[in-house]
Amino acid sequence: MSRLVTHQVGNLRIEGFSLAGEETVLIVPELNVCFDPGRAPREIIAIDNVCLTHGHMDHAAGIAYYLSQRNFVGIAAGRVIVHRDLAQPIQRLMAVWADIEGHPTPGEVVGVQPLEDVPLRRDLVVRPFSVNHDRCSLGFSVIERRHKLKAEYSGKTGPELVALKRQGVTIDEWREITLVTCSGDTALGRWLEHAFVRHTEVLLVECTFIDEDHVDRARGGRHIHVRDLSKIVDAVPDARIVLTHLSRRTDLRRAKEVVQRFVGKSAMERILFLMDRPPKGRPQPRDGAASRETPVSQ
């Protein structure tokens, strides 16, 4: 049985495992993207694009193994998208592994700066943005880009549109739809002001601390405390929200009660916990809603 937990959230399947200080790996198979490799579970090997939110070991330890396993099973070299200041350290890490193993491992390490789009396919990009954790931390949004005819030309016939194009008139525009956003580890910050984040369909966001006496710990480590969630809920009014990065010591049943106390019952209907594993034999809710009957799994 896989240790990853799977949720169907709208049109996307989210697979992952996330416990603070132990491991975080989040996969969206339909988009061919993974946010953080964790310790490189087998489920990420077939994913072509790994977006690393930051360099802490519980999020980044599996990079070398991910690239190595793709080479081992004979598929194309993987791509790791990272903050530009982490690109060279990761390349040095791979060079050390080449010395240890006696041969290099192919792989592409793409260093990016905030708001520098990286194409995933013709109609899909991943957009990194700064978050409030450490100096090399990024969040990522996967954005679908569609061509759309401008409203003022919607009543034109085909020949009329062709004539306008020949005159050099731009008759269409790009429309962007943010399918999923992963904040990585972060505190509240200006990252929530980005329009593409605010209109995301799915938000993967940490909630590391839920105890009232842990506010200072959350602030010191630049993490989300449960009392911050109401601001996040308000910032992404249409998103389904998947909470990650709780501690193993946190009881899920209690966590649900505390979160609902801070965000309200209505908002709670949009929230689920990644590590809320459905019991054996019971299908997961197709809309991503957490069942009230689901027992604590930690």
Image (tube, grey):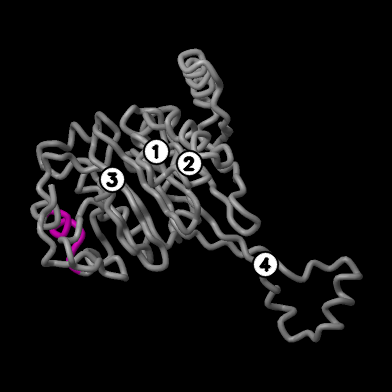
* Along the line of sight, the residue nearer the viewer: 194 or 160: 160
Q: Which image quadrant for residue 277?
A: bottom left
Is the residue marked by circle 2 packed among few (<14), some (14-19), or many (20+) residues within 10 Å?
Answer: many
Q: Identify the element where label 1 is drawn.
A: strand
**Helix, strand or loop under label 4:** strand
Q: Which residue is disc 1 drawn over?
A: 37
283 left or right of 193 in image = left
Q: Residue at x 16, y 60 (%)?
A: 260
Upstream in sequence: badge 2 or badge 3: 3
Q: CA distance from mark 4 to mark 3?
A: 36 Å
At 31% from the left and 58% from the top, the residue drawn is 241
In the image, farthest residue toward the front:
73
Lower sequence index among marks 4 and 2: 2
| Residue 50 disc label | 2
Task: Evaluate if marks 2 and 1 touch, with contact meaning CB atoms under 8 Å apart.
Answer: yes
Check disc 3 and give the amino acid type.
Phe
Rendered view: 35 above or below 282? above
Left or right: 283, with 97 as reference point: left
Disc 1 or 4, which lies upstream in sequence?
1
Would you say the residues marked 1 and 4 are in contact, meaning their CB atoms lie under 8 Å apart? no
Q: Amino acid at mark 2?
A: Val
Quick one: label 3, few (<14), some, or many (20+) residues within 10 Å?
many
The magenta segment: 258-265
Among the two numbered marks 4 and 3 on one chain, the one whose residue lies closer to the N terminus: 3
Nearer to me, 83 or 65? 65
Chief SS of the magenta region: helix
Can you tell which mark lies on residue 203? none
Determine which residue is flagged by label 4: 147
User: Of the residues shown, which amino acid type is indicated by label 1?
Assistant: Pro
Q: Nearer the viewer, mark 4 or mark 3?
A: 3
